[in-house]
Image (cartoon, helix red, strand yellow):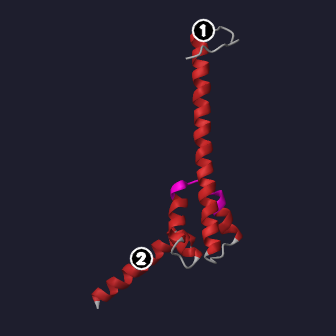
């Protein structure tokens, strides 16, 4: 192992060792973050290409949603869905359908629960 030449003040001290250890750790974290960003960009690009190739139109907001996404798991799920989807709503799942969110789903569940209770009472 080659000796590191340094003009660091206090050369050979614990402070210098910690400084260089912190610098190396920061570089490793930056490299890992860069790789994750690159993977996310690649998945987003692949998703857009698959949807375009399958003639599934993306609105500007949906395209921005895909490109801005950094969640590798979500991008992977969307890409898998895009292989078989017929509409963009199938790609994004329930959260991608217009007018459907957690509140609407809860409302639908309570309505269907009420109708099943009414049926049981009849």
Q: Is disc 2 placed on a helix, strand or loop?
A: helix
- Label 1: few (<14), some or many (≥20) within 10 Å? few
Residue at (58, 36) in percent of width and height? 29
Q: Is residue 52 above or below residue 77?
A: below
Mark 2 and mark 1 lie on one chain; the one further toward the N terminus is 1
Tag count = 2
The picture places residue 44, in percent across and down from the top left corner, at: 62, 60
The image quadrant that residue 32 belongs to is top right
Q: Residue at x 66, y 13 (%)?
A: 5
Asked if residue 100 can be seen in this view, the reply is no
Residue under pointer 2? 110
Q: Quarter of the image containing the N terminus?
A: top right
Extreme front residue here? 1
Residue visible at 59% across and 27% down? 24
Q: Nearer the viewer, residue 108 or 95?
A: 95
Q: Is residue 4 above or below residue 31?
A: above
Residue 12's label in the rendered image is: 1
Residue 17 to residue 87: above or below: above
Q: SS at mark 1? A: loop
Is 67 placed left or right of 109 in the picture?
right
Magenta region, main secondary structure: helix
Q: Position of residue 25 (x, y in %)?
A: 57, 29
In this image, 28 relative to 60: left or right? left
The answer to whether any part of residue 63 appears in the image is: yes
**83 falls in the magenta region:** no
Q: Which residues are magenta?
A: 66-73
Categorize mark 2 by other alpha carbons within 10 Å: few (<14), some (14-19), many (20+).
few
Q: Position of residue 59 (x, y in %)?
A: 68, 72
Q: Nearer the viewer, residue 97 or 56?
A: 56
User: Outermost residue toward the bottom?
Assistant: 122
Q: Are marks 2 and 1 in contact (CB under 8 Å)?
A: no
Quote the CA–CA distance across marks 2 and 1.
69 Å
């Amino acid at each position: 192992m080659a000796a590191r030449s340094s003009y660091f003040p206090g050369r050979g001290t614990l402070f210098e060792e910690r400084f260089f250890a912190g610098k190396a750790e920061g570089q490793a974290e930056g490299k890992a973050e860069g790789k994750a960003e690159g993977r996310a960009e690649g998945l987003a690009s692949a998703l857009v290409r698959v949807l375009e190739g399958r003639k599934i139109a993306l609105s500007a907001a949906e395209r921005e949603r895909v490109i801005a996404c950094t969640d590798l798991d979500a991008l992977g799920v969307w890409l898998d869905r895009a292989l078989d989807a017929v509409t963009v709503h199938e790609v994004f799942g329930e959260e991608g359908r217009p007018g459907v969110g957690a509140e609407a789903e809860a409302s639908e569940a309570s309505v269907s629960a009420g109708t099943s209770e009414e049926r049981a009472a009849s």
